[in-house]
Amino acid sequence: MREKVVLAYSGGLDTSVAIKYFQEKYNMDVITVTVNIGQLEDLNEIAERAKALGAIKHYSIDALNEFAVNYIFPAIKANALYEGKYPLGTALGRPLIASKLVEVAEKEGANIVAHGSTGKGNDQVRFDVTIKALNPKLKIIAPVRDWNLSRDEEIEYVKKHNLPVEIKKSIYSIDQNLWGRSIESGPLEDPYSEPLPEVFQWTKPLDKTPDQPEYLELEFKGGVPIAVNGQEMDPVSLIQYVNKVAGEHGIGVIDHMEDRVVGIKSREVYEYPAATCIIEAHKDLEKLILTRHQLAFKSIVEQQWAWLVYSGLWVDPLRIDLQAFIDSTQRYVEGKVKLKLYKGGLRVVGRKSPYSLYNYALATYESKSIFDQRAAIGFINLWGLPSCLANSMSKEVKKEGIH
């Protein structure tokens, strides 16, 4: 009986060549899996291409809602921005795809799984660690990495075998899902080169955005968005809607230098209209509801959470433990945040919550204030006592010439 390999299939050059390689070089049957998390490609076309290339079976798995609820929503609760910039779209999608690969492999009785990652990027880590954690008995093959294939060699292989694969002429490498869009390669590999307008599809150039601002009201419950402008939406529709509205105003472009897990610095250009709006609104709402101590400690947890997810450790116990803490902070994160969108600019202009810690009677400067200002004198004396004592001691030391 021929051995079976389950391949994460995107329909592109790398994984299409892999199908034939597995058949020709290794005499294996190939089962292909495409997981829909909002990518560019047409799933029906991908399925047809896989069959034309000789895959014995193809799985098209719709995981859009699962991606939104089980991956994006936890990221929103964590205000997840790797290195303060990247909202982790691709990083969130990879462990979900890896889990589906494992499910299909177990269902089909396959001992090998494969994916199209190279040896330079982060995705190889995200795929391999997740697969090994979920089923350590599975062997993992990444054809481009493991066989050291160059793009020229792959193109030559396609031509030699007359494979039904379209050789894309785009100079850019693009990955897209529901949460965002990443663009690499070509002129972008020069960190000083400004991205050309052609790289952006979700965000309009500023000179083509509306000349009037637009207001967007996001409503949260349990730390996640549930409605926009008073209209409740399912998670996928809500993210898609905010992506469209914010993108019309040129919001969500991210251009930064990123530290990859493998140690390489990489110039990354992203489009994240919805993520930019939703995370900013969520952070602002938390400031209204959580205490100073919760916010301070949660900011430390958020950085670690984002690093773990970025570096492929979604399944790590620490990420799961941190998630439990984050979830506990979201019990009362409920309310509405009003955003003003204009010419690429995003500003929170209002917020309210039934669990707000803001007390007008305490905060107001008017005569109706219930805050006893005289109480501040004793507080200041105690608060500054260590600083005052330390400075007094320092002066004495200098006076006496003691070093």
Image (spheres, rainbow, N blue to C red):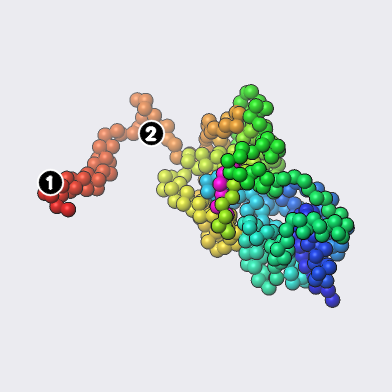
Query: Which tag is nearer the camera, tag 2 or tag 1?
Result: 1
Q: Tell me: 7 left or right of 129.
A: right
Q: Tell me: 268 left or right of 12.
A: left
Is residue 76 visible to us here? no
Front residue of 252/216: it is: 252
Circle 2 sits in a helix, a strand or a loop, which is it?
helix
Front residue of 255/321: it is: 255
How packed is label 1: few (under 14 Cα within 10 Å), some, or many (20 or more)? few
Report which residue position mark 2 lands on: 362
SS assignment for the magenta stretch, majority: strand
Look at 72% across and 45% down and name the residue there: 171
Magenta residues span 254-260
Report which residue position mark 1 lands on: 399
Quarter of the rendering containing residue 29:
bottom right
Q: Tell me: 230 left or right of 46.
A: left
Judge whether 89 appears above or below 106 on screen: above
- Relative image position of residue 39 (x, y in whole percent): 73, 48
Tell me the kind of residue under disc 2: Leu
How packed is label 2: few (under 14 Cα within 10 Å), some, or many (20 or more)? few
- Relative image position of residue 81 (x, y in whole percent): 55, 47
Q: Does residue 74 belong to the magenta stretch?
A: no
Judge whether 342 appears above or below 293 on screen: above
- Relative image position of residue 337 (x, y in whole percent): 56, 35
Q: Quadrant of the N terminus?
A: bottom right
Tell me the kind of residue under disc 1: Lys
Look at 55% across and 57% down and name the residue there: 263
Look at 14% across and 52% down and name the residue there: 402
